[in-house]
Image: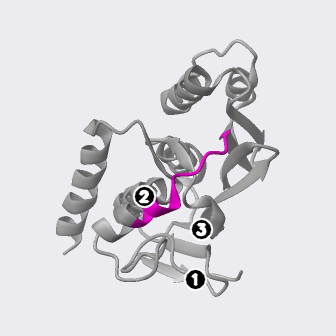
Amino acid sequence: PEVAGLATDLAAILRSSISGDEVVTLEEELELVDRYVNIQTIRFGDRFTCEVDVAERYQSCLVPKLALQPLVENAILHGVADREDGYIKIRAGEEEDMLLLYVSDNGCGIPPEVLERLNSGPRQLPDGHLGLFNVDSILRLRYGEACGLSARSTPGEGSCVWLRMPLKRKEKAHAEVIVRGRGAVGPPGHRTGGGLVRPGLCGGWRGCQRGRGTGRRGAV
């Protein structure tokens, strides 16, 4: 079953990467992150937990496809890979008319020289962090220099990398068609089955965790 699940998750990520859609809803992006975390959980076992705290009102926001996955990959491979109690959190917020997506971890931190490159005005390619550079480049080319990737970090304590982009939502009626087209039986925005994000008590998806091989709802 584990191998079959791995193949299914990998196939879904590959299909998405070669699809013609350049933007997806945040809900769809989180589903891809869920599949990626499933794959890494097989590799690292119970050495890290990933929590999602994203309110329902952000689920229909449009984001570039595979924008979050490189941030989660960086948090796992360069942050918590050497810890036994790794913790990663994904959350969303807004500032004026901008959508902010955060990925934080309690890992080893980003080296100062890499952090400087990530936050510099003219972007420089940071060694070993090609995925972050690519996401930043995509955001800036698509939305302008006011958007992109930023990071902060404390050595030995952890890091936070976040994306800034215009807050745009998909048409509600169209989003409902897409959700129901995947076979969901609940109301629009409600996903059934296992996953990184589950319906919370407030109607949104909050405090849900992936780690130790299970998805469970944490404190809201």
**In the picture shown, does residue 159 fall above or below 41?**
above
Q: From the viewer's perspective, tell me whether residue 79 is left or right of residue 119.
A: left
Amino acid on which disc 1 is placed:
Arg
- Whether residue 59 is in magenta: the answer is no
Asked whether disc 1 touches disc 3, contact meaning CB atoms under 8 Å apart, the reply is: no
Q: In terms of secondary structure, where does tag 1 sit? A: strand
Amino acid on which disc 2 is placed:
His
Rendering coords of residue 220 (x, y %): 71, 80
In the rendered image, which quarter is residue 154 located in? top right
Which label's residue is closer to the chain start, 2 or 1? 2
Name the foreground residue: 181 vs 199.
Answer: 181
Name the foreground residue: 173 vs 178.
Answer: 173
| 2 or 1: mark nearer the eye | 2
Magenta range: 166-176
Q: Residue at x 22, y 52 (%)?
A: 11
Which label's residue is closer to the chain start, 2 or 3? 3
* Residue lying farthest to the front in this orientation: 173
Q: Which residue is mark 1?
A: 217
Q: Residue at x 36, y 64 (%)?
A: 177
Amino acid on which disc 3 is placed:
Glu
Q: From the viewer's perspective, tell me whether residue 170 is left or right of residue 166.
A: left
- Whether residue 171 is in magenta: the answer is yes
Q: Residue at x 61, y 81 (%)?
A: 203
| Disc number for residue 150 | none
Residue 85 in sight: no
Q: Which residue is mark 2?
A: 174
Q: Residues within 10 Å of mark 2 (few under 14, many from 20)?
A: few
| Disc number for residue 51 | 3
Q: In terms of secondary structure, where does tag 3 sit? A: strand
Rendering coords of residue 131 (x, y %): 49, 32
In the rendered image, which quarter is residue 114 located in? top right
**In the picture shown, does residue 72 fall above or below 90?**
above
